[in-house]
Amino acid sequence: MTAARTVLLCGLSGTGKSSFLAALWGSIRNKNTSCALALAELGEEREYLENLWRKWVRAEPIEKSASEIVQPVELHLLDKRSQPPPTLLLQIPDMSGETFREQFESRQWTREFENEFAGAESVLLFAHSVGMQEGTTLAEVQHARLGLGNAGNKPTVGPNDKSDSWEIRRCRTQVQLIDLLQCLAREVPIGRPRRLAFVISAWDLLDGTPLKTPNQWLRKRMGLMEQYLATNPSLFTAEAFGVSAQGFDYEDGKGPDTHLEGFANSAERVRVLCGTDPTVRHDITEPLQWLLPGG
Amino acid sequence: MTSELPHSCGQEQCNVRETGSCLEGIALEDCPHYQLASEAEEADGRGIEDNEGAAEANEIDLTGTLVRELPHGDALTLTEAGVVSGAGPSRLIVLAGDRDCGKTTLITSLYESFLTGEFCDSRFAGSMTLPGFEQRAFLARLDSGVEIADTPRTSAAASLLVLHLCLVTADPDSRRLHMLLGDLSGERYRLSRESQADARELRFLRYTDRLCLLIDGEKIASPRERIGAIDEAQGTLRSLLEAGVLGDKSRIDVVCSKWDLLQDDDRAAEFVEGGFADVREAFENEVLELHFGRIAARPAQVTKDIPHGFGLDALLRRWISPKVSPDRIESPLPPARDTERECGRFARRYPVKEPK
């Protein structure tokens, strides 16, 4: 018997959700995949995933345009960790970054979203490893100059548009994410902790920095989020994952051929780290494994 | 509608569930915590027969789509704060002091202290007012475009605005505590010194766990302003005591702000000591507790001796310490009917549920 499980996939725009889905499809679509989760069957409708995969496999940017329709995904999976391997239907109703932004700013969500998605037992929450509104304070910069803090090491990449005017969209990224989790927990409680995989995307951009594990990143870059997850075990059972779905920086000037030449298969290109472990693995299904019962 | 738990209160040590009597000895209908807690519980998963709240949560937007209103995220009104305090152990701390003395900056810096990790052996566990904090903290951010950190001024016309931080303390019991930080324009405190009627307007101070009265360190740094600064602090305390909104159950912190401006000025520092001694002599027998402190919530130039948030840890430790006895003053004024309705609507719409 196939069990159905719904995973809410969410995060702000540009946090790697589509790349993750593309890499996931590319990693599990082949019968001889080395991933712990495999496709039990291809399923009926695959055009969206195939389109994402086509760009990903050639290292072409997945365009973020208004015409890009975010579509729900259904995956019929085989869990190879158990014998006999059970099958399960994984439904991922992708919540676009634009929807996320609108909900946060308007302070309301649609009943359709609430009924179909918000009741999900599991959440895949995405944040970009360097591209975020970190909200570094002037005091942190002063402390760094005095050697009292680490703000001086923070990357300056991110949507830091200079303006004196306050708008709610200027809230720090971690605040926007915590707000979503609080709304889920408050408005649509499920009576037990939701399993949450916190995916830090574009992990390859942290190469050469002191941050070696997802937990280190969470503590240094999103201290408020780290505390929120740790202090609310009755609401969320969380684990942090560092994921490089692209495998390398498309814009580093070397060109895709140079990078792709070194890989023997699709999965090899993917990098995944979990929690406090600095070991790099290549199974992009690890965050999904965590979300499944017994994960 | 009938409630399965007619007696309920979120205040620590209140046994109203068992005894039917209020911890503070006041009539149940006059206690905002009893009343609000019961309303919140009615809305908490027991099925709402009165669908007023549910109807409000389901609204139609301009495109005709059925939507659910989410918590506004800005500072809470006093009645909304009552819903939060009814949900579990809480502390209502109200900041007092004249215009520009640093009340909002203190609240904002306290929030900022948790952004990078635990602070003062406490960890962040949630907030109903995250966008409200962010708005107040925005002009201290590098990406706001400012070169010198600033804090937006609290409107003189606004009623008490309450920012909320839920903290989990590091003590063996890991207590979950709702910190409710009340901010009010300095103008209202000036008016309270000029008129007893205006002082009586601040009757919500009866419900506070602590009043934190700030003395502006920038004024202390100026010889021609410093005497007036101490006198204003004394005048504020006296008018609030004589108006009956503070009394022998009140816990007061008198804090000199902007200490970074005084650290190298021995005469000014001595003056502060003398001012504190005068306040102690004048009021220590009139209130339950009187503490003194020095802070530099957002120093103009941080140093190793005066880092960002200097003095806030001592203040927060006092604020979150377990209460040993009931300390609020009895309220002679039951909440107005419309206020009760507002509380009920807020409680039904945004029940603040404590994780089990």
Image: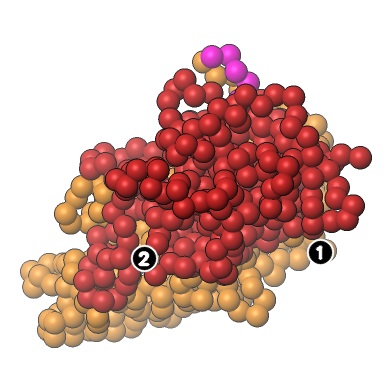
Chain colours: A red, B orange
| Magenta segment | B63-67
Picture layout, residue B94 above or below residue A54: below
Instruction: Give residue B316's position: percent from left, percent from top.
Output: 45, 72
Q: Is residue B184 magenta?
A: no
Taking the spot 46% from the left edge, 72% from the top edge, the residue there is B119
**Residue B288 or A265: which is nearer the viewer?**
A265
Nearer mark to the viewer, of 2 and 1: 2
Q: Chain of mark 1?
A: B
Instruction: Give residue B356's position: percent from left, percent from top.
Output: 74, 60
Local crowd size for mark 2, using a 10 Å CA cut-off: few (<14), some (14–19), many (≥20): few
Is residue A281 rendered to the left or right of residue A91? left
User: Residue at label 1?
Assistant: B19
The type of residue carrying mark 2 is: Gly
Could you give the CA–CA distance between mark 2 and mark 1, rounded to whole angstroms? 63 Å
Residue B129 seen in this snapshot: no
Taking the spot 41% from the left edge, 75% from the top edge, the residue there is B313
Q: Residue B331 occupies which quadrant of the picture? A: bottom right
Label disc, if present, on residue A65 of the rendered structure: none
Q: Secondary structure at mark 2?
A: loop
Instruction: Give residue A146's position: percent from left, percent from top.
Output: 22, 75
Q: Is residue B66 magenta?
A: yes
Taking the spot 39% from the left edge, 38% from the top edge, the residue there is A169
User: Residue at label 2?
Assistant: A208
Picture layout, residue B183 above or below residue B156: below
